[in-house]
Amino acid sequence: MKMQPGDAVRIRGRILEEVENCRFTVNLGKDDRNIALHFDPRFNHLRDKKKIFMATRKDGEWGHEQRDDNFPFFWGKQVEIMIAFLGDTFEINLSTGHRIVFQNSLKMEILTYMSVVNVAVSDIKFC
């Protein structure tokens, strides 16, 4: 995969009913130790209940964090997420119309890594 500013990815699938740690994740970055966007909706994980947690990871260390209270997700149900890489920011659009902006604080210019955890993916489309 190769994403650069102006590119977007749409992910569709079904959230697994028995998700590990009561959450699912989408990661975009360079590799699993260098993640520009860790998108992590949490049903009930650590101190977060029905919150979307986002963070960065540099050389394996977690960094910049942000939370959003809009939580339109349900176990076992379909999910659609569109993530636009705009260079300085990521724009995450949920199927409900809710939009979240997350800073690209690692200043990555090219994204070559993506992982999706605890979602049975039915379609991934790069735009």
Image (tube, rainbow, N blue to C red):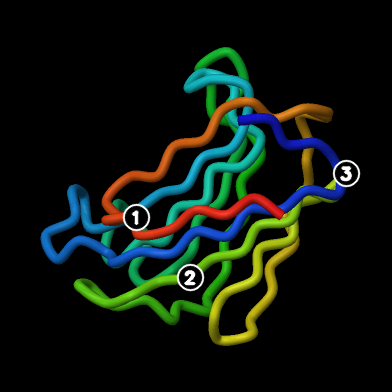
Front label number (2 vs 3)? 2
**Which of pointers 1 and 3 lies earlier in the amino acid sequence?**
3
The residue at 61%/46% (across/down) is 65
Which amino acid lies under the numbered mark 1 shown in the image of this protein?
Val
* Residue for badge 2: 80
Total marks shown come to: 3
* Residue for badge 3: 88
- Most extreme residue toward the top is 59
Q: Secondary structure at mark 1?
A: strand
- Most extreme residue toward the left is 18
Q: Quadrant of residue 82?
A: bottom right
Asked if the residues shown at circle 1 and circle 2 are in contact, with their CB atoms under 8 angstroms apart, the answer is no
Where residue 42 appears, as percent x and y from the top left, is 36, 61
Q: Quadrant of residue 17?
A: bottom left
Where residue 113 appears, as percent x and y from the top left, is 56, 28
Q: Secondary structure at mark 3?
A: loop
Q: Which mark is residue 81?
A: none
Of 87 and 12, nearer the camera is 12
Which amino acid lies under the numbered mark 2 shown in the image of this protein?
Glu
* Residue for badge 1: 121
